[in-house]
Image: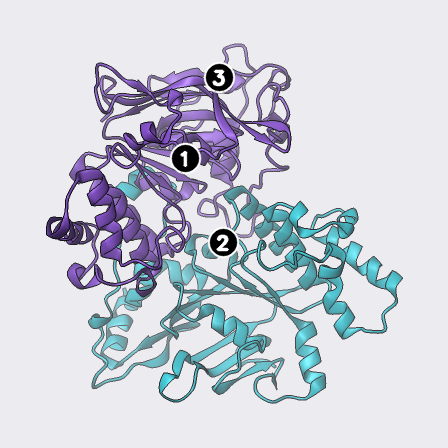
Chain colours: A purple, B cyan
Amino acid sequence: MLNNGDIILSVKDLHVKFSLRGKVLNAIRGISLDLHKGESLAIVGESGSGKSVFTKNFIGLLDKNGWVDSGEILYYGMDPEHPVDLAKYKTEEQWQTIRGKEVAMVMQDPMTSLNPLKTIGWQIEEALKLHQGLKGEAASKKAVEILQDVGIPEAERRAKQYPHEFSGGMRQRVVIAIAMACNPQILICDEPTTALDVTIQAQILQLIRNLKEKYGLTTIYITHDLGVVANVADRIAVMYAGDIVEVGTCEEVFYDPRHPYTWALLSSLPQLGIKGNDLYAIKGTPPNLFNVIRGDAFAPRNPRALKIDFEHRPPYFDVSPTHKARTWLLDPRAPKVDPPEIIRHIRNIHVGGVEE
Amino acid sequence: MIDYKGREVLCSVRNMEVTFGKGRKAFVAVKGVNFDIYKGETFGLVGESGSGKTTIGRAIIRINPISAGEVLFKGERISGKISKEMDKMVTQKIQMIFQDPMASLNERAKVDYIVSEGLMNVHPDMKKEEREERVSQALSDVGLLPEFATRFPHEFSGGQRQRIGIARALIMEPEFIIADEPISALDVSIRAQVLNLMSKLQKERGLTYLFIAHDLSVMRFITDRIAVIHKGVIVELAETEKLYAHPLHPYTQALLSAIPMPDPDNEKKKVVKVYDPSVHHYENDPPRWIEIEEGHFIMANGEEEAKYREILKK
């Protein structure tokens, strides 16, 4: 499934900072990540962990007070031999060559991301005209085709309607249609189903997966709910306080998680909770990113933290070629620390009771 | 009020109908809804947006007037025209927790005022010291520091704000709390904190909850019984475990199949069912609200009833 030769986007030691009320906030603290062509990556983290900020760098949508402090974002999509460094892009003209055509984004709330004064057809045609150079009749024909593609019935009639005539789920389909109209290589979905019902959520996830397979899209899926990504993601990156603390294939992260933060996220899911018992709740709040963080950012909230976690930042330790985690627990010198019971239980079922 | 099985019914909804608008524009949002909520239980109401689940909650607490049927609280009617004393009793005994803690707190008021506003209405002659005492008690009950009383809502995180919303309900010493999607707007880790707090308070004070949500995964964890609502009609009602084990109505099955599970192997094999109302043949044989097995109610016509009984026998 994963072919290491086909890297489409490669992030190297990325640091992003924001200036807020005269202070500097370290939003992204040294992330390195490779994105493979055709894969679907889920980025999971609490609000404020920097997951949106991280992906906004790929499309030039960082807020005005934010900047890339150091690091590279190499994009191989246009010319595999000569990647471009998106971290050096400054002007709108430069971004126009990337935004939409190469990387497109679906935002969280379909209620606010459409123009209420224009018909659905017009809004899709706008993207077609800009990015594919289609005109008039051809553009409107293509728009209807795309609407059919994202599963909107009676596309021809619906194209003449306005956003208020669509339900939430249908609007999200339209937003996806607009993103697809640009014919992108990478589709970033930022919490695409948070504002939607469970049944609609399942349909939208299905749609994104179908489009990915049909067009060979690379998708990045951002969410705070680890529970929803099991069926969309090939790989999962868990973010905490502006850093990726664990990354692995979907099975590795769900069945054999290694970082205490991933343990905590999984154990707080009500799907896994036992009725009558308390759910596991992560104590405290995420660290203040205005301050310099020493050691493992999760240590203050981690009941199993080691002494070294408060002093030195852990490097990545490889669990398997595709699975790595930033925690001292994986260091050969670390004492044996047992994960919470739920995690041990899952691991026993799926990894066949292999304990180290 | 005690029902025939000897359980104490706290709140009971009889043939509730809620209509918005008048004449030709009238829209019936909720029709023919029947259920009892027992004292001390957590009763769940699940449905998609627009299904009328929030409307039912709001109708119980008298925010939306009902156009037919009645609501009984401890055996007394609280819907329609009621006396001033009754109205005051309802305001005190039934409280509501709202969905979005970012939108449901007055931005210009301090926490002290937000939490004690209800007290001022019900006990206008309460002394200032006593009121402050009650506020700090309510705040510490929900795990906030009493010092927070002098702060403004914008100084708090989402989870803390939802706790303020809960403190505001608790200070009235209610018996019945209607929680309308109390955790939908919160992060996963904060969700767990709020859910734990709610169940702790329930154990300590014998509270009864009506828990309204669209998220079935949370519902299974927290509720004792669940009613599934579709387009203003309750289609199935049963004990939570029974409903999850043997969902009978096709809509319930569709809802359950859509729950995302944190298990990649199962997720990749799973088939999401889509509810198609045309599977029912209600033209000649309209559905009725029947008790198909003990405590398990369903909306079905004669043909479906026979089919469901067949399934249950297995």
Above or below: residue A25 compared with residue A84: below
Q: Name the residue located 59 percent from the left edge and 34 percent from the top edge.
A: A286
Above or below: residue A90 compared with residue B185: above
- Could you say whether the residue bearing mark 1 is in a helix, strand or loop? loop
For disc 2, the chain is B
What numbered label is drawn on residue A330? 3
Q: Residue furthest top?
A: A333
B189 lies left or right of A42: right
Which quadrant of the rendered structure holds the C terminus of chain A?
top left
Please report whichever mark, 1 or 3, sits nearer to the chain's N-terminal start. 1
Q: Name the residue located 26 percent from the left edge and 21 percent from the top edge.
A: A76
For disc 3, the chain is A
Viewer-nearest of discs 2 and 3: 2
Viewer-nearest of discs 1 and 2: 1
Q: Which residue is mark 1?
A: A61
Above or below: residue A96 compared with residue B299: above
- Could you say whether the residue bearing mark 2 is in a helix, strand or loop? loop
- Kind of residue sitting beneath label 2: Ser
Q: Quarter-wise, where is residue A288 in the image?
A: top right
Q: Which residue is mark 2?
A: B184
- Kind of residue sitting beneath label 1: Leu
- Could you say whether the residue bearing mark 3 is in a helix, strand or loop? helix
Q: Quarter-wise, where is residue B226 in the image?
A: bottom left
10 Å crowding of disc 1: few (<14), some (14-19), many (20+): few
Q: Is residue B258 visible?
A: no
For disc 1, the chain is A
